[in-house]
Image (spheres, rainbow, N blue to C red):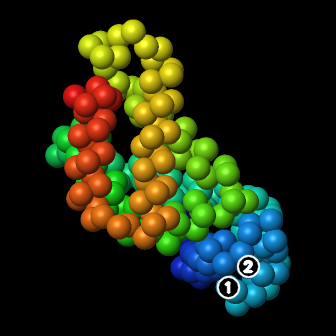
Amino acid sequence: MEGKVDRRITRTKEAILQSFITLVSEKDFESITINDIADRANINRGTVYFHFDDKYDLLNKCIDENLNKMISATTETNASGETVDLIKSSFLPVMNYFAENHRFYASMLANKGIPAFRERMLELVTSHIKLHIDMGGNNQNYSKELVTQFMGSAFVGVIEWWILNNMPQSPIEVADQLWGLLKRNQVIN
């Protein structure tokens, strides 16, 4: 029976990922060791190496998994099997996702040893903006690349501020205000 995943492997990987996220929230990424991760997960270091090449591989897989979940929070499949982009109507699903995963995003954004996380998040956001931005009207005299980078940086900056300040406004308030700002700047229609 191919394709069946051993639950022990799934639990072990989850324990490693959760231990890693906890450690990232407590100390600088560069000072975290495989022994730290293994001790926190209550496994031996060989088990960590069985699943991940090193802490950088673990970091990359953790980032990939969570950014993919972020993307999944912005889409759904309709009755005919087509993928529907929820961002066309509201930022609430993605803001709720950030709120539900606050610990992970706060750990990644607060840890100065992990600039790759913010960069990859910005890359995802700017690629989405580039697909949807209206370069007519107020944007017609500007470079699409410059407007895209500006708006992407603004969006990620607001998310970073919101998360690192323990979400001082509700997800719906931030979603509505971001929607209005991006609509006003013709990023969304």
Name the residue: 42% across, 43% down.
Answer: 155
Name the residue: 60% across, 64% down.
Answer: 110
Mark 2 crowdedness (10 Å alpha carbons): few <14, some 14-19, many ≥20: many
Callout 1: SS: helix
Q: How far apart are marks 2 and 1 (CA)?
A: 6 Å
| Residue 174 in picture, x, y percent from top left | 29, 55
| Residue 147 in picture, x, y percent from top left | 45, 24
Please give the residue where the numbered disc 2 appears in the rendered image. Answer: 37
Q: In this view, does 57 lie to the left or right of 123?
A: right
Viewer-nearest residue: 83 or 97:
97
Viewer-nearest residue: 2 or 58:
58
Q: How many labels does the image show?
A: 2
State whether residue 23 is above or below residue 86: below
| Residue 189 in picture, x, y percent from top left | 22, 28
Amino acid type at image mark 2: Ile
**Circles 2 and 1: CB atoms closer than 8 Å:** yes
State whether residue 34 is above or below residue 29: below
In the rendered image, the residue lying farthest to the left is 79
Viewer-nearest residue: 41 or 108:
108
Name the residue: 81% across, 71% down.
Answer: 31
Mark 1 crowdedness (10 Å alpha carbons): few <14, some 14-19, many ≥20: many
Amino acid type at image mark 1: Ala
Residue 94 in which image quadrant? bottom left
Q: In this view, does 178 lie to the left or right of 157?
A: left
Answer yes or no: is residue 93 visible.
no
Please give the residue where the numbered disc 1 appears in the rendered image. Answer: 41
Callout 2: SS: helix
